[in-house]
Amino acid sequence: MRKRGYHHGNLRQALVDAALQLIEAKGPTGFTLSEAAKQAGVTPAAVYRHFEGREDLIAEAARQGYEIFADVMQYAYDKGQPSALAAFEATGRAYLAFARKYPGHYIAMFESGISVNRTPELAAVVRRAWDVLENAAADLSQHIPPDRRPPAAMFSAHIWALSHGVVELFARNSPGKQSPFSPEDLLESGIGVYLRGLGLIGPDD
Amino acid sequence: MRKRGYHHGNLRQALVDAALQLIEAKGPTGFTLSEAAKQAGVTPAAVYRHFEGREDLIAEAARQGYEIFADVMQYAYDKGQPSALAAFEATGRAYLAFARKYPGHYIAMFESGISVNRTPELAAVVRRAWDVLENAAADLSQHIPPDRRPPAAMFSAHIWALSHGVVELFARNSPGKQSPFSPEDLLESGIGVYLRGLGLIGPDD
DNA sequence: TGTACATCAGTGAACGCGCGTTCACTGATGTAC
DNA sequence: TGTACATCAGTGAACGCGCGTTCACTGATGTAC
């Protein structure tokens, strides 16, 4: 992290990276602009050359997280093709994998309290991420008998909620840690039961 | 909130109530000991007659929340008897109802970052609350054909995660607000599909 | 290749603020006799 | 019923701290000629 002279070179991204690291280590509460500046080897005042303030820095960290998140979800979806079922299951797994691999981003996105509608750019990338899951759900719903087919938006919401709950309760420092099952197993089996309930997989799969 | 003289009468509980109100209004981050004291009509220093400090006050708020939570879950369970299915579904609904009715407690419990193992009393009441759900799951698993019966701890974890995810994403200020379905509908239908997947309710229920 | 100068990205000192916490204190309450 | 006194629950002033933010500044860089 040593400077290469008076000018940093890429301070903006260095600050985002520092913020992500601090948010991961201390939670969104513990994160301070001053400390991020210090970690990037720079005076707190320098931050204001690149961001409007503390909130703006967090929002950028979250935005980058959603960008990665959307890519990861899209990749999982594509990889599962042409099977609608495989694609859908892959996106569910991708949610947990993302939370595990990018904990700082995840916290900035879901636990820092920044509003999704803070800027149009942020809102757009959030939309892009969730659209992947909704598309996967819509594809899949084609395979459900129409008379018992729930709206795609509804069952993507179910899977999203299940994934989010598993992450929050079992993959992070919350009251659910004592479970004897890994988050991956919980999510996998939960989605399995759910899809069976929709008649999408047989009883013996 | 006016004082009745030099002595408050029930300052301890008044501080907890103030804390709950502030936590609900401003999030766990925004809550300050000084403000809670002010709201209770008292000097910040007075708080230290009743609590060890800021953290201790939040922990007590969370403890009272778990106490209520456990009671609510137990009540729902009892009310669903003797039907194992009705009892289980009722506990799921009770989770969401609790989050709605006691948002301050809910935040103190699940979003304030206090550790469940902070004190033995806290750990005990947390245990009591979750045991209700696990018992409901265990009762219900008796009705599943043994060869496809998942461990009770696993499927209570599924329902817990689903409930928690629905609350976090759709019943509070998170990125999921735009869903066209109410949290109650989402949870109800999600649990329905899940139980159908376990073979516990028929395709036409 | 060298010089003048505009632009940019940082510094460092200072600010006001509210925080959690401590301390010696004092007013109110309850009890013993 | 009245007085002395211990105990309790509050006050209010003070503290050190780190925060986010501002400001005038200066060192480094890049470009025109």
Image (cartoon, coloured by chain):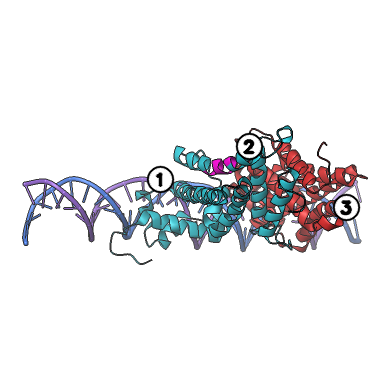
Chain colours: A red, B cyan, C purple, D blue
- Range of magenta residues: B129-135
Q: B150 and B117: which one is in front?
A: B150
Please identify the quarter of the rendering in which residue B173 is found: bottom right
Query: Can you give x and y, in whole percent of width and height, for residue A117 in the image?
Result: 72, 62
Q: Which residue is mark 2?
A: B153
Q: Which residue is mark 3?
A: A139
Q: Are marks 1 and 3 in contact (CB under 8 Å)?
A: no
User: Is C28 positioned to the left or the right of A50 in the image?
Assistant: left
Q: B183 and C17: which one is in front?
A: B183
- C-alpha distance separating marks 3 and 2: 32 Å
In the rendered image, residues at marks 1 and 3 fall on the same chain: no
Q: Say which chain tag 1 marks.
A: B
Q: Amino acid at mark 3?
A: Asp
Specify few, some or many for label 3: CA neighbours under 10 Å numbering under 14, 14-19, or 20 or more.
Answer: some
- C-alpha distance separating marks 2 and 1: 36 Å
Q: Say which chain tag 3 marks.
A: A
Q: Is residue A152 magenta?
A: no
Q: Secondary structure at mark 2?
A: helix
Q: Nearer the viewer, mark 2 or mark 1?
A: 2
Q: Which residue is mark 1?
A: B52
